[in-house]
Amino acid sequence: MTEKTTAASTDKDANRHADNHADWHAKQYMLFENERTRPVRDLLAAVPAEGARLAVDIGCGPGNSTEVLAARLPGATVSGIDSSADMIAAARQRLPQYRFDVSDISTWDARGPYDVILANAVLQWVPDHERLFPALIGKLAQGGSLAVQMPDNLDEPAHRLLREVAADGPWAHKLKGVERTTRHGPGWYYALLKPLCARVDVWRTVYHHPLAGGADAVVEWFKGSALRPFLAALDDTERQAFLQRYRDEIAKAYPALADGTVLLPFPRLFIVATREVR
């Protein structure tokens, strides 16, 4: 997920991340719906759509990405899965015409074959990509595509400060190992997928999201994603102190513009892997 690869987390740490991900709340996640949905639009624009009949959104969240998927593939049967019951409830309310199920990507056993498998901002939470990505390719129909978008921002100040605040406080023992560190670069994914696919397209985009509200808005953004595992491990008093310290550091790293807006840089990695036709 960046140009360099760091040491992988243990399975225990990865499972902890997945459990925390399952506790995300749809309402918090969708505070920035337009900003969070734009990358999936860009991703799906690069996916071959002609003739697609069966598509699935794995890690569908509250259904915003599924809605884009269905619009891109108007003739396809579309469904979604997510490990969070709260997210699935929100998706069902948003898109009652489609099927949504609570399921863990790591153990998802649907065979397909699917013409499109969409994984938008979710696989960074799932371990063992060396096994997982080929398994997902194996669920594709001939000519089908795996479309993946993952945040590539672990080197950004927001994540660096998160690690520093976690390690420097009375909560350090509780938060050791919580930070997501498993990541691979574009070349790693290309080398993994190219022998299995007719075409692999990999690119990286840095979005600059204007957030009204200064440092508080940046903190609210990450409360819907990267902060979740940290906050889940703390009690109420610790959580408030942690957030205040993090907010103070964010204010220094992301100074507001004259109108109070913070421009949040957010790098993302995109992959479209298309299975060969035999």
Image (spheres, rainbow, N blue to C red):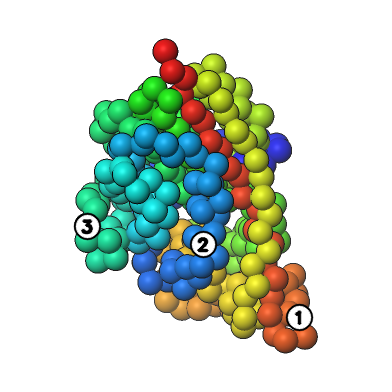
Q: Earlier in the sequence, mark 3 or mark 1?
A: 3
Q: Nearer the viewer, mark 3 or mark 2?
A: 3
Q: Which mark is residue 152?
A: none
Please identify the residue farthest to the bottom as the structure is shown: 259
Which is nearer the eye, 208 or 98? 98
Labels 3 & 2 near each other (Cβ < 8 A): no
Please identify the residue farthest to the top as the structure is shown: 278
Q: Earlier in the sequence, mark 3 or mark 2?
A: 2
Labels 3 & 1 near each other (Cβ < 8 A): no
Q: What amino acid type should be assigned to the residue bearing mark 2?
A: Arg
Determine which residue is flagged by label 2: 36
Q: Which mark is residue 257?
A: 1
Give the answer, above or below, for where 64 lies relative to 242. above
Tell me which residue sits at (68%, 64%) in the image: 208
Q: Quadrant of the C terminus?
A: top left
Task: Using the rendered image of the protein, determine whether residue 116 is visible from the camera's viewpoint.
Answer: yes
Tell me which residue sits at (24%, 53%) in the image: 98
Give the answer, above or below, for where 61 lies relative to 171. above
What percent of the width, then of the height, locates residue 19?
36, 51
Tell me which residue sits at (71%, 38%) in the image: 3
Residue 164 relative to residue 243: left or right: right
Determine which residue is flagged by label 3: 97
What percent of the width, then of the height, locates residue 239?
48, 73
Q: Earlier in the sequence, mark 2 or mark 1?
A: 2
Q: Is disc 3 placed on a helix, strand or loop?
A: loop
What percent of the width, then of the height, locates residue 121?
49, 50
What percent of the width, then of the height, locates residue 169?
60, 67
